[in-house]
Every structure is written in C-alpha cells, then in structure tokens.
Image (cartoon, coloured by chain):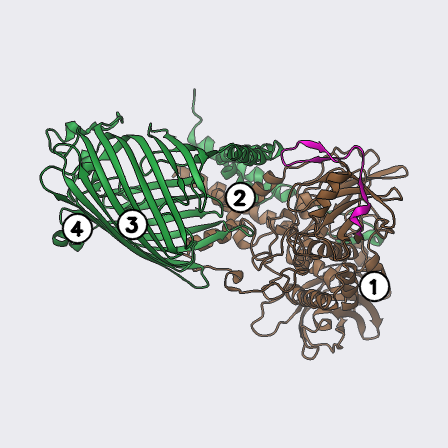
C-alpha cells in the first residue's frame, strides 16, 4: 500500500514534469534581440582544434544511440510519439538571423545565374597555364588527393573522380557546393579544373603517407607514376575539382552540443534552425555524407573581432555520387547501418521491406551515377549515418528549409549544373530535370505539412485591416487557387474580439490573397485601458489553417501575432508555422 | 542505524515531488513584464533547461550507465584502432605473411572442437597451380591437426570451374581430445554424455576432375590409423565408466584401414546465398580393415538440395535431404566413431555434437532465410532465418523410419556473409532436449 502511494506520487510528479516540458515550445513575448548580427562574435576567442574520431562518430550514431532506445523506454516512447523540441533560435519571422552559420542569399534576393556559377569566392580555380607544385598528398582510399600550389602561389586541394566514372564526384562537388552556398551556407570555393599532368612537379619536401602511416619521399618520377593511374581525357589532361584551402581551421563542428571554447556558440547545434533545416536541402540534393567530419570551423580575424565561421565541406557524396562509386537506390532510403530497418525485417520475418529492395535500376550515365526521383521520399530520406540536427528537425524547420529549396528556379539550377562542366548537354539536362523533380517533391511534401502563407502584410482599409499573403502551395501549383479555404481563429482579448470562421478568399494563380481582420475601437479610452496591460496581453493572435483536400492530413496552422497601432490597424510582430 | 517512520518517508516523497513540479513550472511563470512596445517581438523561449523527458529517462540512464561505459570504451577503442591504423596493419601483416607463404586462419577444427586457429605454410591448393603446403591447427579445447599436402590444381571436391583438374597427395595427423559420445542407436540418453579422445593418422592421394562447371568427380585412396581412449574433459564422465565392458565397438582399440572412395557432385544455378541453386551429391567408400577384430565396411552418402529465391531475391527457401549408411562385411565390428552421427552446428543443431549415432542416418532440412541488412557497397550481408530440421539414426532406416521417431530441431539464426573469406552464424535452436545457442565463424582462407 505504502509503495503504491509512493508510486502514484512519483508518477504524478513525472507526468506534471512532462506536461510542463511539453509547454516549453509555446510562443512567448520577449525583448527583441539586436536586429543586426552579421556573425557570432567574440573578442577573446581562442578555440582549440577539434579532431573527432570518424569511427566513434559512426558507432555512436548508428549503433549506440539506436540501441539505447531498447534500454531507455521513455526515449523510445518519445521517439514513437514524434515528440520533438522546436528549434531554439528562430526569429519573430520564424527565420534565423544572419550569423557565422548562415547568410541569407537566394532566399532573400534572387541571385543571378552568373552569381550562382561564380559561387562563394572571387577565384576561378588554379592557374593551369603554368606548372603546379604538389606540396602535400594522400594516396589512401580509392582516389588520391593532392594539395597543390599554382604559379600565383595560391594553394588548392585537388580531388579526382573515381576510375570509370569521369565527372561523377567532381561535378557533384561543384554543383551541390554552388547550391548550398546560394541557399545561405558557408562552403569552400571549388572549381572544376583540367590540367596537364606533365606540368605537375613534386615539392622537395613532398612525402606520401601510406596506409600504415609511414611517410615516403616522392620525386617527380614517382608523382608521374601516381598521376598515370588517374583516368585522363583523350588529350592526356586530367579533370579534377580544386578547392581553395581554408586557413586557420579548427576542425569540424559537431551537429550537437556547443563549442565550449567559443563564447559566441551558445545554442546547441542540434537545436539550431539552420542546421535542422539542412534536412530538406540535403534530401533534395541527396547529400548522403552530411556528418561532422564533413564540416569545418574556421577562425576569422576581422580587425578587432575574432569569431568562428562554420563551413559545410565535401559534397562529393551528393546527387548520384557516393564519392568513390555511384549511389544505389538504397542510398537515401536507409542508413548504412540501419538497426531499426534491420530489426523490422528480422522481427517481421522479412515481411517489412523498403522501396529500394524491389527496385530494378540501371545507371543513367557514368557521370551521373544513380540520381533519381523515383524512390525519393522527402519526409523519410536518410543520410549514411544519423545526424543529430537532422533527426531533431521538425515540420517548422523543414518548412524553413523547403523555402530555401523553393527559392531556386530552373534557370538557377541550370547555372549550378553548368558549373559542374560535364560537357554533355544531354547529361546536364538529365541532372537538371532530376533536381527539378526532386525540388517539386520536396516542396509538395513540406509546403502541404503547414499553412504556407508568406509575404504577410497589413493594409488598413475602411472595412478593417487586410492581411495580404502569398500561399506558396498555390504559387507552386500543388493546390488550385479556386476553392482554397482556411480556418481562421482570431483572438484579441484586450478588445474583446474572438472570431472562428472558415473563409475562402479569392486567391490569384500566384497564390496572392487577402484576409479581412476585424477592426476594433480606437478611441482614447481604449488606448488608456490597453496600455494598462502588460505588453504580451495587448497582442492579437491570428491562427490560419489551410483546409486540405479530402484524405490529406490536416496541416499545421500559421500563427500571426499582431500588435494594435494607433491608426486602428495592426503591426505584425511575429509569426510561427 | 535507525529507519525513518513510514509516514515521514511518504512526506519526504511528496516534498520531493512538489519541489520537482515547482522547479519545472517556474520558467513558464517568469515572463518579461517590462518590454517596450517598439522593441517587442515574438520569440521562442530560448534555450530550455531540463525537461520532463529527461527526468523520465534519468533512472534508466543510471541503470544502464555500465552499458554506456562499455559503449564509450568500444568507441574509444575503435578510434584508437583507426588512429594507430590497426586494421591496415592487420591487412598489411597478413599480406606480408602471405608473401612469405604463411596463411593464418581463425577457425575451428570441425564441429565441437572449440575456438581455434590454423596456419598454413607453403603454397595452398588453387586451380591450375602446383601446391605444397603444411597446415597446422590448434583449438582452445586442445584439438590439433597437422596436414602436409603436395599436388597440382584445386583440392579435389572443391567448387571449381569446368575443365579443371587436381591431383594431391597428403598426410594428416590429428588429435581430437574431447569428442562427445552418448551411446549408439536412436534411444541413446543425454544423461550418458561422456567423452573420448581420438588420435588419427592418414596418408593418401586424391584425384579431382570437373568436366563442366556443374559436375565434379573426386576419387581417393588412403591408409589410416586411429586410436581411441578416454577423453580429456574432466567435467564429463569417462566413456568406459558409462559404457563398461566391450559395449562400445572398438573403443580403446587401434584400427588400421585402407580405403578407396569417390564422390560425384552435380550443381545447378548460381553461387551465393540468394542465387537459385540445386545440388546432388553421391559418395561411396570402401574401407578394408588391416586390424584384427575390425570389420570391413562400406560407407554411402547421398544428399540433395535446392535453394529457391523469390520476391526479388529478398528471401529464399532452402530444402535439403541427406542419407548416410555404413554396411559391414564379414566378422568384426565397425569402429563406433565411423558411424554416421547427428547433432552439432552442421546437423540437427538443437542437439550436442555427435548426440545420435548409428549405422543409418536420415536428415531433412528446411530453412527460410531473408536478408535483413546488406552492405551498401560490398557484397556483405546479414541474413535471418527460420529453420526446421528433422533427423533420425537407426540400425536400419528402411525398417525403423517413423514420423514419431524423428528428432526435431527448429529455431532461428542470424548469418553474416561477406565477400571475403569470412562469415559467421548465430543460432538459437530448440529440440527435444532443450534450447541450444550455437555460434560459428570463420576468418581466413
């Protein structure tokens, strides 16, 4: 009896705790953060170089954590419920501030095709008109890689395509790098380069490290032998991707936790909107190898300021490339070691299967590898190893990411693909078509998960205030404008207004529409009363939820927070999707 | 030590719970009240602290802390191994050994021999190449074997390409220290579990020919000498104490035999676990005794099987039948260890190795297996399976074969198949005598 009562008390406490925890994602009113914050800054930043283990990272994310669900039932239960904490750093517009993680580019202002082709730097790649000197090299793995210095003294990291797949990894690296950069992320400046191997010499100090870690001096003759094994063009020249070397590197950033030695790094990375939102982008471009070892922190010295800038690097396993081989239909559908899928197959005696297992495919082209929209499911796409930030992403984060995807049009994608210099219009056309189709699927999935009203604007009219908007689902053609209906919930407690309605405002083919908001008494007495309330009580809240077609799950609503202004209208002070 | 009264303990629990609730409820009541209208905006709460799920998980985390320590240790070790390039060093060391005609293997010496390894010195048999090798193996249970071999071409009976030819001479000496024995006949009892040691030497020659890729023929002639005595497993009863007198044929005696035999194998279909396959094996051997009291006898073995993949080769059904018999001639006894046996990892795995032994053996095996994981790049894969086997031993199978006398063995297994020469199988099998867990693996050539 005694034990039972104790259990009841503890159970109630835990339940209350859980309830309290669940309420933590509610919107609250707070002081606005500074509007201009170009980069996370810190005057006394002296971070140490990180060198996380590749194997432990793989074991930790692919094996230990999934197995922990077996031993920690609440975690498994939470995962089953789909209970997730929303990102910690969205702004009032449900966006992120520009920072050393992310800069608004194409999503804010359309980049021209030439800007897309140019990418992040002013460089056009190494100077191939004169000799290159190899200053560092690795010969481990399937393809070798060099660090070279060109005649101008600029240093580049040079990587090659896998044998028999000319253009596969190098084009993927450049194309995806351009698109991630245009989306807003920091990436190294990469270019396709074609060089004459006979004009490559070895630095005097050049040494190759063999798989056992032993260093061997390399002279010009040995270097030429290594270059002979790399596939070349009929004219003897070799195609490669050249990446500008980043300086003051601090090693990779983790996709969870913070960097303890960076005072500006306060938000756990797994709860950063810009990292969670990578899910939609990575799925779109099949960025399979999105893990901490493919990121890089760089210490930036900007006058008196020092701060850490965070880069995504190595896009060799994107589109149809798996780096050293073409991708397969399995990639993107299942983790390399997917304990959940394996267990499901095991426990169901093989009844549970994934789409790729019955999918017969043929390689489209050696330069493309396997890159298709056939099995692409934007909501269940998976990289090679579980990524904590991507695992934490919610519909709101992915809607944010999907808007980055939506910002690209066909002309821009053609520009990015042309930067890959595949040299075959047909191959480029296949890539463009596939990227566009995956864009369509990505948007169709995430835009319909919420009520995608953008371009929100208040216009006072004699009848009341008009909330203008653009419905992205209509604009992208996923929903016809005619008959598009919304459930409206409007609460303005200070004015005693409470509205529950279903409306079908006229919407243009581009998704533009308006919703009339109720007016309120704007006399002096009203304002006197209103100002007596704490500021968070003065707000009106509008909740708009699109009514889906029959059989389609109900989307999330968009919540718009409105502050009454003296003119009798409102000012939008916040929104959340 | 004085225990607190029960009522006090309850109050303490209440207090703790209330404190917990209060702490967690606190942040939601602390809202900013002094914001200026011009600077307000709607923001998220920022960085939440501990949440309810964290609290609910805490006790489980404490309980499983030792597992975490083990996991982190394993992760550290994995990183250290990679940092010190241990996998590359192992591959390199193996290649260096191979270059010096040394081929190490991690494998057992047959069913029941326990964990062990072997080292081959020389040039191992391979198609269209001369070979000369000496192979020694040893297991933790004290089993050992030494084999010297010289010849040309692949080992007779091995899976070879059409048109290949192999001829070998070999000599083997081995000691199997803890071979288990339960008596002879279908009604032997597990309670009679005992062990014996078998020491055997053999010299012979073998010829192999595969006119096509689907057909292989092998012929051999050999001279052998075998001796049995009480086994070395102190935990078991000695064989002569359980079976006193001369109830076990040729136990304690030395047997010399001259044997001549042949095997025909017919295979159809592809290779690999998910390829359609069918196979038939017929083998016969005549053993002529060179010792007093030991009988001449013939051994005949026939086996047939089929693997039927279906559903895009995601799953397969494997069926197999096997029949073995020995038939004596003239006076004398057939040595007990030459009788066909059931039990162990390769036949009727729910029973101990050599659990049933008699002149005739019949075995039917059915296995449904399905791929649960495959490596994205290499041909490695993990298969799960359900199997149902039934076997019988009898002095005359034609007369004694009855459904109720079949010994069942059924269960589930996980098998690892790699493209390289490595593999393993973990099996949970149930039979009339309980449940057994079997683990087998092999790494190396």
The hue used for chain A is brown
Residue underneath mark 1: A113
Question: Relative to residue A12, is residue A327 depicted above or below?
Answer: below
Give the image location of residue A83, x and y in percent: 58, 52
Q: Which residue is mark 3?
A: B263
Callout 3: chain? B
Which corner quadrant of the image does residue A432 belong to?
A: bottom right
Q: Which residues are magenta?
A: A195-218
Dividing the picture into quadrants, the one containing residue A167 is: bottom right
Chain letter of disc 2?
A: A
Marks 4 and 2, how far apart in space?
A: 45 Å
Q: Say few, some or many: other residues with alpha carbon within 10 Å of mark 4 (under 14 / 14 to 19 / 20 or more).
A: some
Q: Secondary structure at mark 1?
A: helix
At which x and y percent is residue B251? 17, 31
Q: Which chain is represented by green in the image?
A: B
Q: Secondary structure at mark 2?
A: helix
Residue B106 against residue A180 in the figure, above or below: above
**Residue B278 versus residue A472: which sits nearer the camera?**
B278
């Amino acid at each position: 009896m005694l034990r039972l009562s104790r259990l009841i008390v503890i159970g109630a406490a835990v339940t209350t705790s859980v309830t309290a925890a669940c309420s933590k994602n509610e919107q609250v009113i707070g002081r606005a953060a500074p509007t201009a914050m170009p980069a996370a800054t810190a005057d006394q930043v002296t971070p140490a170089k990180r060198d996380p283990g590749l194997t432990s990272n793989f074991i930790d994310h692919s094996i230990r954590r999934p197995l922990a669900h077996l031993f920690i039932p609440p975690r498994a239960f939470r995962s089953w419920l789909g209970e997730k904490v929303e990102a910690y750093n969205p702004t009032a517009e449900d966006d992120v501030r520009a920072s050393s993680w992310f800069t608004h580019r194409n999503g804010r202002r359309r980049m021209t095709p030439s800007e897309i082709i140019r990418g992040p730097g002013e460089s056009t790649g190494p100077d191939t008109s004169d000799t290159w000197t190899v200053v560092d090299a690795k010969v481990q793995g399937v393809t070798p890689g060099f660090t070279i210095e060109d005649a101008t003294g600029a240093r580049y990291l040079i990587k090659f395509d896998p044998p028999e797949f000319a253009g596969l990894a190098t084009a993927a690296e450049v194309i995806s790098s351009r698109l991630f950069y245009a989306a807003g992320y920091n990436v190294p400046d990469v270019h396709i380069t074609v060089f004459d191997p006979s004009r490559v010499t070895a630095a005097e100090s050049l040494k190759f490290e063999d798989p056992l870690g032993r260093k061997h001096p390399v002279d010009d003759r040995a270097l030429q032998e290594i270059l002979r094994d790399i596939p070349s063009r009929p004219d003897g020249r070799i195609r490669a991707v050249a990446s500008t070397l980043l300086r003051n590197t601090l090693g990779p950033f983790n996709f969870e936790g913070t960097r303890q030695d960076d005072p500006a790094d306060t938000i756990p990375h797994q709860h950063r909107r810009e990292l969670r939102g990578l899910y939609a982008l990575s799925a779109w471009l099949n960025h399979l190898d999105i893990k901490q070892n493919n990121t890089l922190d760089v210490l930036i010295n900007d006058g008196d300021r020092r701060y850490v800038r965070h880069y995504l690097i190595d896009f060799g396993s994107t589109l149809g490339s798996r780096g050293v081989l073409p991708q397969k239909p399995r990639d993107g559908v299942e983790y390399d070691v997917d304990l959940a899928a394996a267990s499901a197959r095991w426990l169901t005696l093989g009844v549970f299967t994934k789409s790729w297992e019955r999918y017969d495919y043929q390689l489209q082209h050696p330069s493309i590898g396997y890159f298709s929209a056939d099995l692409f499911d934007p909501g269940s796409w998976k990289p090679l190893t579980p990524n904590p930030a991507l695992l934490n992403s919610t519909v709101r984060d992915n809607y944010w990411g999907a808007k980055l995807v939506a910002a690209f049009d066909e002309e821009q994608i053609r520009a990015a693909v042309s930067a890959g210099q595949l040299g075959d219009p047909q191959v480029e056309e296949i890539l463009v078509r596939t990227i566009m189709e995956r864009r369509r699927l990505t948007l169709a999935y995430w835009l319909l998960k919420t009520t995608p009203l953008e371009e929100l604007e208040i216009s006072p009219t004699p009848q009341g205030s008009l909330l203008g908007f653009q419905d992205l689902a209509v604009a992208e053609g996923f929903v016809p404008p005619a008959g598009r209906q919304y459930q409206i919930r409007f609460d303005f407690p200070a004015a005693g207004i409470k509205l529950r309605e279903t409306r079908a405002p006229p919407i243009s083919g581009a998704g533009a529409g308006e919703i009339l908001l109720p007016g309120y008494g704007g006399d002096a007495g009203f304002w006197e009363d209103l100002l007596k309330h704490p500021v968070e009580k003065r707000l009106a809240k509008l909740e708009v939820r699109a009514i889906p077609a029959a059989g389609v799950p109900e989307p999330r609503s968009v919540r718009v927070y409105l502050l009454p202004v003296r003119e009798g209208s409102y000012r939008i002070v916040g929104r959340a999707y | 030590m004085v225990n607190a009264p029960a009522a006090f303990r309850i109050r303490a629990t209440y207090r703790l719970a209330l404190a917990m609730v209060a702490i967690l409820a606190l942040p939601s009541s602390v809202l900013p009240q002094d914001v200026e209208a011009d600077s307000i905006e709607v923001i998220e709460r920022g960085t939440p602290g501990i949440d309810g799920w964290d609290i609910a998980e805490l006790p489980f985390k404490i309980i499983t802390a030792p597992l975490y320590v083990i996991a982190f240790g394993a992760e550290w070790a994995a990183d250290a191994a990679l940092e010190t390039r241990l996998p590359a060093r192992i591959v390199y060391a193996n290649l260096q050994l191979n270059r010096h005609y040394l081929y190490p293997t991690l494998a057992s010496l047959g069913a029941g021999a326990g964990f062990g390894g072997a080292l081959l010195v020389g040039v191992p048999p391979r198609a269209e190449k001369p070979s000369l090798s000496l192979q020694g193996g040893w297991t933790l249970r004290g089993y050992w074997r030494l084999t010297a071999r010289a010849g040309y071409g692949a080992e007779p009976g091995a899976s070879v390409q059409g048109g290949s030819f192999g001829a070998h001479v070999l000599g083997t000496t081995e000691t199997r220290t803890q071979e288990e024995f339960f008596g002879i006949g279908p009604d032997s009892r597990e309670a009679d579990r005992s062990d014996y040691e078998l020491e055997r030497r053999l010299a012979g020659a073998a010829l192999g020919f595969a006119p096509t890729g689907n057909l292989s023929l092998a012929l051999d002639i050999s001279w052998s000498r075998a001796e049995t005595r009480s086994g070395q497993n102190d935990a078991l009863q000695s064989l002569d104490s359980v079976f006193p007198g001369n109830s076990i044929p040729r136990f304690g005696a030395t047997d010399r035999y001259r044997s001549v035999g042949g095997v025909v194998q017919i295979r159809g279909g592809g290779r690999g676990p998910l390829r359609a396959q069918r196979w038939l094996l017929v083998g016969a051997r005549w053993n002529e005794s060179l010792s007093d009291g030991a009988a001449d006898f013939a051994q005949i073995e026939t086996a047939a099987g089929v693997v039927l993949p279906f559903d895009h080769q995601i799953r397969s059904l494997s069926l197999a039948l096997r029949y073995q018999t020995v038939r004596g001639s003239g006076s004398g006894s057939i040595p007990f260890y030459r009788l066909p046996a059931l039990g162990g990892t390769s036949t009727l795995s729910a029973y101990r190795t050599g659990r049933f032994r008699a002149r005739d053996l019949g075995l039917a095996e059915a296995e449904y297996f399905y791929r649960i994981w495959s490596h994205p790049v290499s041909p490695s894969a993990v298969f799960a399976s359900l199997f149902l086997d039934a076997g019988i031993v009898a002095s005359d199978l034609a007369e004694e074969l009855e459904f109720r006398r079949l010994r069942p063995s059924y269960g589930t297994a996980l098998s690892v198949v790699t493209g390289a020469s490595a593999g393993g199988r973990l099996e949970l099998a149930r039979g009339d005598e309980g449940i057994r867990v079997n683990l087998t693996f092999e790494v190396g050539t």
